[in-house]
């Protein structure tokens, strides 16, 4: 199954480690440090030029973590995953 993160970015469910709300999670210093380190290492992909609302941590085929910044809210992304899971259960 695939999850559309915005613009032309699509990932598979198998790649997803976690989906996080940017406003709520960046209050913690550890989260800010993690995102900063990922940015410096070139592991951050900005899905659009709009203000990001969420970040999605994924692993690629080599096992490295990739962070996607998306303008789509976590609630919308969750709704999309639930809809896709429901469709596959039919």
Image: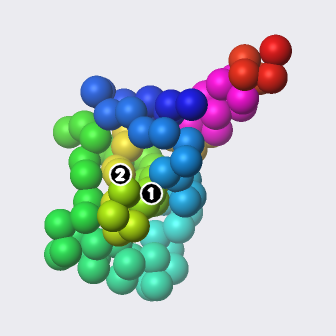
Range of the magenta residues?
76-85
Determine whether 19 is above or below 70 in the image: below
Residue 22 image point, x, y percent: 46, 58
Check the image and name the residue furthest to the front.
62
Residue 50 in view: no
Residue in the picture at 44% in, 57% down:
58
Between label 2 and label 1, give the one nearer the viewer: 1
Determine whether 2 is above or below 66 in the image: above
Determine whether 65 is above or below 34 in the image: above
2 or 1: tag closer to the N-terminus: 1
Q: Nearer the viewer, residue 39 or 51?
A: 39
6 in magenta: no
**Badge number at residue 58:** 1
Residue 61 in view: yes
Q: Nearer the viewer, residue 43 or 1?
A: 1
The secondary structure that dominates the magenta segment is: helix
Residue 2 image point, x, y percent: 50, 31
Determine whether 6 is above or below 56 in the image: above
Residue in the picture at 45% in, 84% down:
29
Residue in the picture at 19% in, 74% down:
41
Quarter holding the C terminus?
top right
Disc 1 is placed on an element classified as strand
79 in magenta: yes
Q: Residues within 10 Å of mark 1 (few under 14, many from 20)?
A: many
* Residue at the disc numbered 2: 68
Left or right: 51 as drawn, with respect to 1 = left
């Amino acid at each position: 199954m695939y999850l559309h993160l915005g613009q032309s970015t699509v990932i598979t469910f198998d790649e997803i480690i976690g989906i996080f709300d940017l406003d709520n999670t960046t209050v913690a210093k550890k989260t800010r440090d993690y995102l900063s380190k990922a940015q410096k290492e070139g592991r951050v992909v900005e899905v659009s030029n709009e203000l990001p609302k969420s970040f999605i941590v994924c692993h690629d085929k080599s096992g490295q973590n990739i962070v996607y910044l998306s303008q789509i809210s976590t609630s919308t992304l969750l709704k999309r995953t639930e809809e896709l899971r429901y469709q596959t259960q039919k």
